[in-house]
Amino acid sequence: MGPLNIILCEGATLTLGGFDAYNFGDLNIYSQSTGDEMGTLTVDVSDYDGYNAIYAGRNTATAGDYYKFVSWTASYTGGSSESTSNNTYTVGAENIEGLESLTALFEIITYKVTYKPGTGAVGDEFVDTSEGAAYNLLNTIPDGWFVKPGYTLKYWKIGNDTYGLNAAIELTGDITATAVWQKKAAPMPPEPEPVPAPATAIYLELDTTEITLREGESSYISATARDWLGYPVNVTWTCDNDDVVVVAEGFLYALSEGTARIIATAGGLYAECLVTVVKTDPEKYTITFDTDGGSDIAPITGLAGSAVTAPEAPTKRGYTFIGWDQEIPAAIPAKNITIKTTWKIKQYTIKFMDGNTVISASALDYGAPITVPDPPKKEDSVFSGWTMTIPSTMPSGNLEISAVYVPIAGLIIIPQDTGKNNTSTAIAGETTPVPVEVPETTVDKKTITGVQNDHNEMDLSWDKMPEASGYQLSVQVDGKYVPVVNLGNVTNAEVILGTNGKYYVSTGGKYAIFTYDKNNGKFKKTGTLSKNKIDTVNVKGTSKNPI
């Protein structure tokens, strides 16, 4: 059997103990320093029976700049194995039996370099990585990182040490490099063309005397200078505050917040322009709240990172506030966002009553259409309306609405005999004929029948009384019957009870309108109206005393 070669790396030592060190030839150990060939190393020792001497080399191996030792794994016959992270693994008589292979595991070395923007810069820090210890710091700031308006990158600071741009360094762990800035120099103006000019100017004027710039902005001031013959005269430019703005041949570049005077001089004359430099406003962002028809919530606008105070929950008629479709951030993000409400519709109960009897009851969503039930029919009274105007859709509250009826017994038909004082106590709706006393004439029978329909109408009819020359419609008011109208010699009439205090009476054709005058205790005719023009709202609306 030939020699067995084992390749080791920095930090990994294999010791084969318990054997005769003077018997060479079966196992050789080599060092390896080529980084790109490192990785997992497997050593097959299945042929060693423990009796052949094994030589343990004492070489010191190097893993290079890219890899480091992780662990040893010993694999045995039958599939069992054991691992250790110790960088030294010893093979001896006690563990050589059944040993099939040794595996040394290595991993690549990776370092993290964090770049911070430094004082006054705008933007977030950035993290770069390096495989191996050799690394060059950045020479320029990539697009999309951080920037400082009006400044250029000068050098990097790591801890208390400073390093130039693109400096080569040796990494031994993760580091943080902070940018250090310096003001930009003013842009160089184009070379002016030579202008022949006399020595003395008699005219000098600037195109502006005041100008406002933001930090990092540039502009240009034009100067007109001539001598007495009209020839151009050279202009010299100066600034009294170079920390705020710099000037060259009329070109301006704003450096930092403040004011400065730009002075143009030509042939003994001078003119000034006041320059004001303001800070570049950082962009602001807005959080908008969409309440979907609920109470208004003012938007929140501010700089990215500004603290946000969550608004009070909005309200909406007929709905319960559930929450927002996304969490309200604790700080304003670097973008505009809209946050919407989530609502749950409320339900309310509506009851239609006849006294203490429930006609119908239901639970409806807010805004759902309301179906009005038919009121019960009654023999002794007519339906006059409901105790309130019924909305078409469910409002934001429970409703209890009662039916109102007008008793038929409030009407009476009195037979008339010409020239006689006629009286009667017959009441509409009675089922038994009631004798009616008429002076000098006895009426044996009278029958009045009341019929109710959808418009609170009563169709009244009675037996003809031969002795009567006509009939009178009267209404009971405060316990006594008050005449409404003489009907003539007919045996039927149509009467509509109006909730507006009016009675509509017809014996055929148009309806006569009668209104009770409380001042004199009498009914008076106030007009006529075709049946199809009668105000059914007044007829079917909220019930009141008919008078």
Image: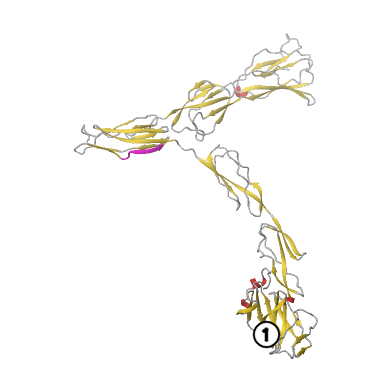
Residue 19: image quadrant is: top right
Tag count in the figure?
Answer: 1
| Image spot of residue 496 (x, y percent) | 68, 77
Observer-nearest of 53 and 319: 319
User: From where the camera sits, is residue 432 visible?
Assistant: yes
The magenta span reads 207-213
Work out which quarter of the rendered image holds the C terminus and state it.
bottom right
| Image spot of residue 464 (x, y percent) | 74, 88
| Image spot of residue 73 (x, y percent) | 73, 23
| Image spot of residue 378 (x, y percent) | 76, 73
363 versus 41 height, above or below: below
Work out which quarter of the rendered image holds the N terminus and state it.
top right
**Amino acid type, label 1:** Leu
User: From where the camera sits, is residue 188 visible?
Assistant: no
Structure colour scheme:
secondary structure
Residue 349: image quadrant is: bottom right
Task: Say whether residue 211 is magenta.
Answer: yes
Observer-nearest of 278 and 385: 385
Observer-nearest of 17 and 433: 433
Task: Say whether residue 219 is magenta.
Answer: no
269 versus 401 height, above or below: above
Give the residue drawn at x 55%, y 45%. Answer: 299
Q: Residue furthest top?
A: 22
Relative to residue 228, is residue 16 drawn left or right?
right
Q: Which residue is mark 1?
A: 487
- The local secondary structure at tag 1 comes to strand
Relative to residue 115, is residue 185 drawn left or right?
left
Residue 380: image quadrant is: bottom right
Crowd rating for badge 1 (residues with CA inside 10 Å; few <14, some 14–19, many 20+): many
Q: Residue furthest left?
A: 229
Observer-nearest of 491 and 226: 491
